[in-house]
Amino acid sequence: MPAYKAPLRDMRFVFHELHQADTLLAGLPGYEELSADLIDAVLEQAGTICEEVLAPLNRQGDEHGCLFENGVVRTPPGFKQAYDLFRQNGWTGFACAPEDGGQGLPKAVNSLVEEMICSANLSFGMYPGLSHGAYLTIRRWGREDLKKTYLPRLAEGAWSGTMCLTEPQCGTDLGLVRTRAVPQDDGSFRITGTKIFISAGEHDLTDNIIHLVLARLPGAPKGIKGISLFLVPKFQVGDDGSVGAGNGVSCGAIEHKMGIKASSTCVINFDDARGWMLGEPNKGMRAMFTMMNGARLEVGIQGLGIAEAAYQGAVTYARERLQGRSLSGAKHPDKAADPIIVHPEVRRNLLTIRAGVEGCRALGAWVGLQLDVSHHHPDPQTRQNADDLVALLTPVVKAMFTDFGFEAANLGVQVFGGHGYIREHGMEQLVRDARITQIYEGTNGVQALDLVGRKMGAHAGRYLRQFFHPLAAMIEARIEDETLGPYAQPLAKAFVRLQQATAQIARAGMVKPDEAGAAASDYLRLFGLVALGYMWLRMVETALPKAGGAEDGDGFYSAKLNTARFFFDRMLPQTAGLFQAIMAGGASLMTFDETWF
Ligand SMILES: Cc1cc2nc3c(=O)[nH]c(=O)nc-3n(C[C@H](O)[C@H](O)[C@H](O)COP(=O)(O)OP(=O)(O)OC[C@H]3O[C@@H](n4cnc5c(N)ncnc54)[C@H](O)[C@@H]3O)c2cc1C
């Protein structure tokens, strides 16, 4: 695997030129001091630590994995030193509020930094990623004293966080949670139960681990409406923030798994552990969604990070590997054979990854920006609109980006041929690491159900309008344009398919809910491709005036237009097949008798 190189050029394009994020953010209270130079400096520093510290540890982390001995988990060699450096350089508090000791940088920048971390070392990224989710949840739902004690320690990375939802009998269906929480006279709770598959549940990177645990109060209603959320530290914490004795939290085992081997996946036992409620009784899912929604976007970015790593590996190899001759005559007659990059099939693989990466990067940063607007904009209506858009696009980002990440990792292996399948080049690790991103934080099938079941019809289509209206306006204004028309026209066709599919699912799903379920995954993919098309049309518009000009010395803008052409010619048409599958309905799935399987 070639050394990872942070894709700063494209990130700058997305951030400054495409989204003009500096201007937008500088208009938001709290971000007035942000400048393009500051953001570039941050991205550069993040790139350096990812290239020089995290990426070189990735292979070793995979081969060594985590070790479990006598209740203690040891991360692979080098992880603790890397984490300490990461922490000392302020990266754990990068997106935390200044009053908690963080740097208060916007989500839009954070999503680019997260992408680099995930490209460099997905397993490593799990530890600070989960901690940040716990930080945000405590900040939003915690009592003042809890915030004061826990937030600064999480921001500085001295403590880490987890999310404890899953139990042996309870995965997707969180209504089945059995862990119990018994109220105490002093306002605390005693938590008892077993959680499984807890990422970063136990490790040797930090002094304390703060678990956010879903549990049931005595007499709580059955199902999802009887779940509350609790903060449970591994070690007790004194009033002065000092770490004390154990708190009835122990690690029973770690899982041996397909990928992300350097990220510990733990069985965590709570045995009368002392905890504090976050949010209100029986409304734990509401509070937990703060963590889950953030985590879903972050997992989407994990898919993007893997895809970028796969692209870099595959391109380098395709330039070096000599096999066969170009179909149109030798391109390098001086060599024993042409490099495989001359072959259309290899180019198709490379461009599929590239078009997906650049589209997802643009979309991920846009959603990040909307998140910043939804938190910071002074106008309540603008905040609400941005919030609606984030709610709509969260399942799309999670599922489409991670499906794409896995696809990209597989295509990367394909470019390497047999050399991708063996361990030497690190390409097979990407496939194994990518696979979990389609499963955790709600499987991608469940994301699709969220999109059609909750988001599509929410508030009589209000979320959808936030996306459909600007897209329709953009297409209408460009479709007759001589240069932009050829890009806007295929997007217009795909958009019509999306609108018709939306109407069909809404109609059929009202009569038979299975119809909506049967269409969900294809619909999410169709939606995602149209969303990427929207980004690509905007990227074309941004790049066109510069392509071939003085600013295009390195061919960046010309390549951007060519990649766009590939997307519109070869990827967006997939929407036609998806549309047909959706319109065919779910009968062939649901009439199949259970005994025939
Ligand atoms: C490496 C790793 C790390 C993890 N980290 C964490 C963590 O930090 N914290 C945590 O709490 N959990 C964690 N998990 C658990 C993870 O979130 C779950 O595995 C996931 O949510 C799916 O639950 P499950 O495995 O029980 O599958 P199930 O819920 O049993 O689902 C099995 C299959 O059925 C489908 N399915 C289930 N219900 C429905 C439905 N209603 N409609 C349609 N399809 C459905 C699913 O899509 C899936 O394909 C982790 C898991 C792994 C493997």
Image (cartoon, rainbow, N blue to C red):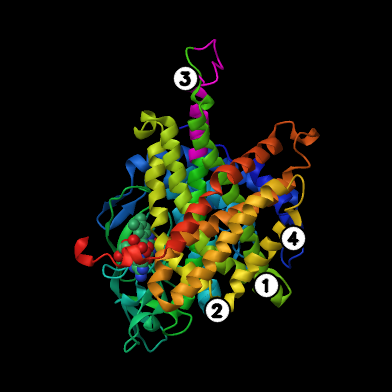
**Quarter placement of the N terminus:** top left
Residue type, mark 3 in image: Leu
The stretch in magenta equals: 310-335
Q: What label sits on residue 383 in the rendered view?
A: 1
For this orientation, the residue located farthest to the left is 595
As for residue 204 lying within the magenta part, the answer is no
Q: Earlier in the sequence, mark 2 or mark 3?
A: 2
Of helix, strand and loop, which one carries label 2?
A: helix
Which residue is under mark 4?
Answer: 24
Residues at circles 1 and 3 in contact by the CB criterion of under 8 Å: no
- Where is residue 395 drawn, in percent x and y? 50, 63
**Quarter placement of the C terminus:** bottom left
Which residue is under mark 2?
Answer: 144
Residue type, mark 4 in image: Leu
Q: Earlier in the sequence, mark 2 or mark 1?
A: 2
Residue type, mark 2 in image: Glu
As for residue 330 lying within the magenta part, the answer is yes
Residues at circles 3 and 4 in contact by the CB criterion of under 8 Å: no
Q: Compute the Cα span from label 1 to label 3.
A: 54 Å
- Observer-nearest residue: 297 or 35? 297
**Label 2 vs label 3, nearer the camera:** 3
Q: Earlier in the sequence, mark 4 or mark 2?
A: 4
